[in-house]
Image (spheres, rainbow, N blue to C red):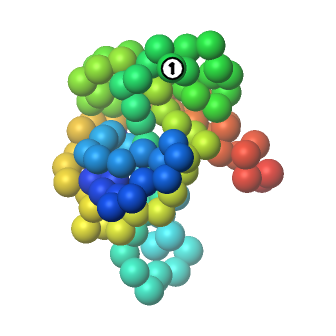
Amino acid sequence: MLEVDFAAQHPSGNEQSGFRPAIIVAVPDFLAPPRFPGLMVVPFTSQVEKFRDLSEALYSMYASGSGGLTRDSIALIDQVRYVDQARITGRLGRFTETEYEPVRRAIKVMFAF
């Protein structure tokens, strides 16, 4: 679990911005050296109430303390995105395999693997 600066000068619609936790879902370096160093991540939000009635398959809920989260949070799996390594501002912790599984399963289905 990382802390990432999702700085966006003009976020559009529901795009996440600001400093927030994110979980790594892909490492391009595992395939070949990329042109630019970065990671694919899923951002989190602590706005739990906004997502409580939506599908947990797409918006997985995590309790404070999981993976270093400081608040109850929702993984915004539909907002998976690339971030440059320069945007990573810290490491928060690590999910267990069990905690990571809902994100892994959703990514697999969402990208049709």
Q: Quadrant of residue 21?
A: top left
Q: Label 1: which residue? A: 50
Quadrant where the N terminus sits is top left
- Residue at 62%, 13% (x, y): give it: 53
Q: Residue at x 24, y 24 (%)?
A: 70
SS state under label 1: helix
Identify which residue is drawn at 80% across, 51% down.
Answer: 112
Along the horizontal axis of the image, is 28 left or right of 72?
A: right
Regarding residue 22, the answer to whether it shows in the image is yes
The residue carrying pointer 1 sits among few (fewer than 14), some (14 to 19) or many (20 or more) residues within 10 Å by Cα, namely: few
Q: Quadrant of residue 105?
A: top right
The residue located at (37%, 75%) in the rendering is: 37
Q: Residue 44 versus residue 104: which sits nearer the camera? A: 44
Q: Taking 29 as reference, is 80 above or below it?
A: above
Residue 31, percent across and down? 56, 74
Q: In the figure, 104 relative to 56: above or below?
A: below
Residue 97 visible to an observer of this rendering: no
Q: Residue furthest right?
A: 112
With 67 as the anchor, is 59 left or right in this view?
right
Q: Is residue 87 left or right of residue 99?
A: left
Q: Closest to the observer: 99 or 57?
A: 57
- What amino acid type is highlighted by mark number 1? Lys
Q: Position of residue 40 (x, y in %)?
A: 48, 58
Q: Tell me if residue 85 comes above or below residue 60 in the rendering.
A: below
Q: Position of residue 59 (x, y in %)?
A: 58, 28
